[in-house]
Image (cartoon, helix red, strand yellow):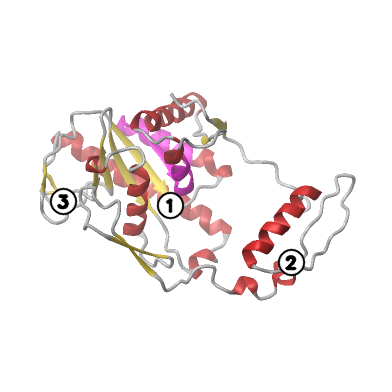
Amino acid sequence: MVKRCAWLSAPPEALDDGLIHLGEEAFAACLLALAGVFEIGKAHLAHRRLGSGGQAYFSTFENLFGDSLEEDLFPSDYLITDLTRQDFRGSKGFSNTQLERTEPGTFQELDIIYLLQRAYTSERIIHGPLKVSDGEELADVVVMGDEVTLLLQAKDSPNTPATLNTTLERKRKKAIGQLKNGLQQLRGAISTIKREGNPALALVDGTPLDIDLAARPLVGVVVVREFFIDNYDEYSTMILKFMDEVGVRVLAFDYNEFEVMTRHCPSEDALLSAFFQISKCAEERRIYPRLRFTDLPPR
């Protein structure tokens, strides 16, 4: 049972004046941290009292840091090859990753597999199993657990300057679209398993897979790039309607939330406990909560 968690299902109150308010101690701590990150000895600030609380605000990043923000914090032309954590089924034995991603699909799928390896042994994780009948992918990731079988769909956006400069409104629409597409792909996988019982599958290299998809209950998971807390009512309506139609427990997370969850739940029992708490809360309140942990993750 996961005990170190708290629910956050409503957006925080926004400040009317649009400023970032900091107490004096927090202001000093942030300034020192930012100075260390950008390797500057001093910064020019616009600082004034905003009432009895003693808050302060930065004028602009341009005035504060000059040209520092125009420099890359990490080289964008690096290609990193990873020879570790590659013993899951469907692995090529290595993987490449890079900061700029024009085609993010495989990159995100591998990132999610690495998170799943915190809770599952590698041999239980299958990357992109293909249906022998038509050569189409059943799901992005399948996890053969002791208690349930996870069907996971990953939906990401390119990591490019154009994507980073996308308006907030467009990002909100993109999140809804990614969730919709992920659920639709899950529908296809679930329908195939229900129709065929245990469809013949193979890895991308043609190696047959000897697994039984009908042996355990199914749980669907969709992981998208980002969710927005004030849109959870819309996300919840989509997921709950989908669950009613397919009769399978389904959850959806953005990547950051899924990373935190697997860090705090490094076993199948702990991860499923968190999943079931979320599902139960969603069914009772008709809105999916965002899980927040109050303690440090286990070492």
Earlier along the polypeptide chain: callout 1 or callout 2? 2
Q: Specify the label residue 177 is tagged with.
A: 1
Queried whether the magenta region covers residue 123, the answer comes back as: no
- In the image, the segment drawn in magenta is 235-260
Queried whether the magenta region covers residue 255, the answer comes back as: yes
Earlier along the polypeptide chain: callout 3 or callout 2? 2
| Residue at image point 40% right, 30% down | 270
Whether label 3 touches label 2, CB < 8 Å: no
Q: Specify the label residue 264 is tagged with.
A: none
Asked if residue 25 lies left or right of residue 144, the reply is right
Between residue 186 and residue 242, name the one nearer to us.
186
Tag 2 secondary structure:
loop
Give the amino acid at mark 2.
Answer: Thr
Whether 291 is drawn above or below 54: the answer is: above
Q: Specify the label residue 60 is tagged with.
A: 2
Whether label 1 touches label 2, CB < 8 Å: no
Q: Which residue is mark 3?
A: 203
- The residues bearing labels 1 and 2 have C-alpha atoms spaced at a distance of 34 Å
Give the amino acid at mark 3.
Answer: Leu
